[in-house]
Image (cartoon, grey):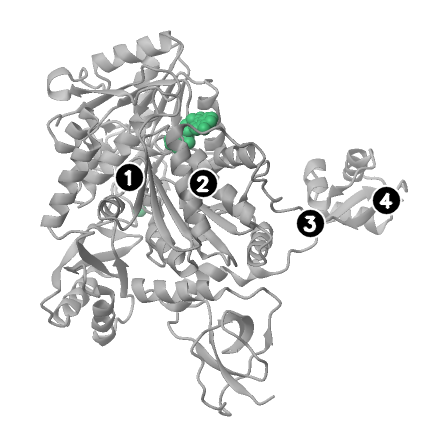
Amino acid sequence: MAERIVDVLVPLAVDRPYSYKTSEALSPGEIVHVPLGNREETGVVWPGSGEAPATAKLKSIIAKSDYPRLPLELVKLIDWIADYTLAPRGMVLRMALRRSSELGAAREKIGVRVTGLKPPRMTEARARVLSLLENGLLRSKSEAAEEAGVSPGVIDGLIDQGALEAVALPPESIALPPDAGFAVPELNPAQTSAANELRDAVRARKFSVNLLDGVTGSGKTEVYFEAVAEILKQNRQALILLPEIALTTRFLDRFAERFGERPAEWHSAIAPRKRARTWEGIAKGEISVVAGARSALFLPFNDLALIVLDEEHDPAYKQEDGVHYHARDMAVVRGSLAQATVVLISATPSIETENNARRGRYKRLQLSERYSGTEVPQLEAIDLKKEGPRKGRWISPRLETAIGETITRGEQALLFLNRRGYAPLTLCRSCGFRMRCVNCDTWLVEHRYRKRLVCHHCGFDMPPPQHCPKCETPDSFVPIGPGVERLEEEVRAAFPDARTLVLSSDMAGGIERIRAELEAVTNRDVDIVIGTQLVAKGHHFPGLALVGIIDADLGLNYGDPRAAERTFQLLHQVVGRAGREKAGGRGLLQTYQPEHPVMKALLAGDRDAFYDSEIASREEAHLPPFGRMVAVIVSAKEGPSAESYARKLAASAPLSDDVRLLGPAEAPLSMIRGRHRWRLLVTSPRNFDLSHYVRQWLAAAPPARGSLRVQVDVDPQSFL
Ligand code: ADP
Ligand code: ZN
């Protein structure tokens, strides 16, 4: 066969595919090995390969790989995201291909068992292994070494000497097929009608976006499980995105209760070998349901028919490093490319989604009552100007009384404070000096349990100094304001017999510990929970009767256009944890601004009032979703070079009646990880292609040299 040219995109920071020669027939999406410089790279055949005859200069493809090809729909999604976010195409591909090592065929796991022969020389380590395996059962090599507390070399030695034999273990299965009919629930009338709508949408086999809008505890999960059941009956594939991996265990169990098996999982905590097998199982259509983090959007489903986004308003869906993309928006794009049914789930939809539902672009399915029939908790304000706590305390007398009553009844209370660590601010009592991060323009936060001062932006930490570095006074640092750890001290002092627990994402022990602690709360092994936003999300704590918001105003004080929305969603979610199974759930909201529109809407339980006013004010200010926004962040090792380049960029922006350019201004977080940061913000009307404008602008801009870096954030969620 004559040689022809084929374009191959490699998962590196390049925007265009490279051309290679090949004599094989290759179609877009196929995974190939190609020479690149003096290395070998794994890439993907990209559409639009030139018809031009192969020239001698081009290198040849090394080989076509055995991996299943990427579906064309995923190739198109990658192109779409690269065009929209301005991220280099190769970096978007990288999210679908991850490290090529993950594609490696799952390595065989080796098991060992005793043969009955004794090794010529017995050592203590060898004896431990042999007694562990005495029962004759097969055990994986690494497990045997770990359990016997010996190095793998000891096992190898025993194999060499014939005391153990090695046997290839069958691959552990990734996910057995879920069974649509395993435990079909009885739905209430509202659930039934929403489930029917979703089932019809799936059967229609065409693109649609549905908002499943239901109060907290209304049983939204049971409803979308019926759409999943329909997918299983059709033998097609479904993707369920969840905002937080800490939530997945409970979710996986719940899925298994309904379908008999857990779904496949996809997130960063999955081991490489399992990832490889999962990836392949999805590409081959052997795996039908995946539950995962936002990165699961880039999996090579070959027949994706349903995408569910649980808690669609959650900020965790926006990726803030590398490729800046919003998984909700990209799920809708993938859904349209795949002609799939998209279901967005929330009790407090994002303004974007609510607006789309109001305008009929998305279909709204509503569940307005809790499944258990209990009322959504009564909310009362505690006006901190009038009935605040005593000095040096954070819990007002009324809230303290309510906590006492709750735990006396044997129920649970949750205190919500979205501040990790002991205190947000620590300073020297005698000179006012504050400890600063060495890499960032931020103050260090004291974490008393860990006995460290920690930077919440780069993770830098250090032991608290014995004396003030400036005035040298010993033991002079005093905490100002509360974090969850400090709040716990107050709770323990007030309720010494209660079982208290702090739930925060940065406790030692990581995800496993958080999962165990969430379980403990569910099982009522805890009376008073003190938590950050980690506790707000989707948990079902049957014994929780009271929620106290320590500082309801906390999120309102940033100069962020989404501050009101975020605060409303977060507080609504937190309060929704209370009284889910038993009547009489209660929420107390400590605030200095009971008259603020967000607080008023929350207190009145008037969600629509909040959306009406927020949508109107966004529209008036041409803020998203009524206008487009792109942030451009310039950073460099030296402040002046970041600033002067940001000014040059601004000066080189093409004139356009549709575009407004704000800045450059020094970023509120003016230094992160040793890089000085300046921000520009461009805005335009909604119908203007702002990505295209920014691409052309940056392509013609003066080159960024040295340590300068330019980051583009389309539809920014963070303005720091
Ligand atoms: P939401 O996600 O809307 O906040 P959940 O889906 O967590 O609510 O449901 C709340 C509780 O009600 C859960 O314990 C769930 O198991 C239960 N539930 C909901 N619908 C049903 C049903 N049809 N049959 C039995 N239990 C249900
Ligand atoms: Zn830092």
Question: Does 143 appear above or below 372?
Answer: below
Please state the quadrant of the image where ligand 1 appears: top left
Q: Please state if 218 lies on the left or on the right of 172 as rendered.
A: left
Marking on residue 444: 1
Please name which of the two marks, 3 or 1, marks the residue nearer to the observer: 3
Horizontally, residue 237 falls left or right of residue 589, namely right
Mark 3 / mark 4, whichever is N-terminal: 4
The amino acid on which the numbered mark 2 sits, given as a three-letter code, is: Ile
Within 10 Å of disc 3 (Cα), the crowding (few <14, some 14-19, many 20+) is: few
Residue type at tag 1: Leu
Q: Where is residue 196 in the image (x, y as percent from the top left)?
A: 42, 39
Q: Which residue is at the front of the view, 540 or 607? A: 607
* Amino acid type, mark 3: Pro
Q: Nearer the viewer, mark 1 or mark 2?
A: 2
Which residue was labeled with disc 2?
245
In this figure, what is the number of numbered marks? 4
Comes first in the chain, label 3 or label 1: 3
Q: Say above or below: 274 vs 451.
A: below
Tell me how far mark 4 sits from mark 2, CA to CA: 43 Å
Quadrant in which residue 464 is drawn: top left
Q: How far apart are marks 3 and 4 (CA)?
A: 25 Å
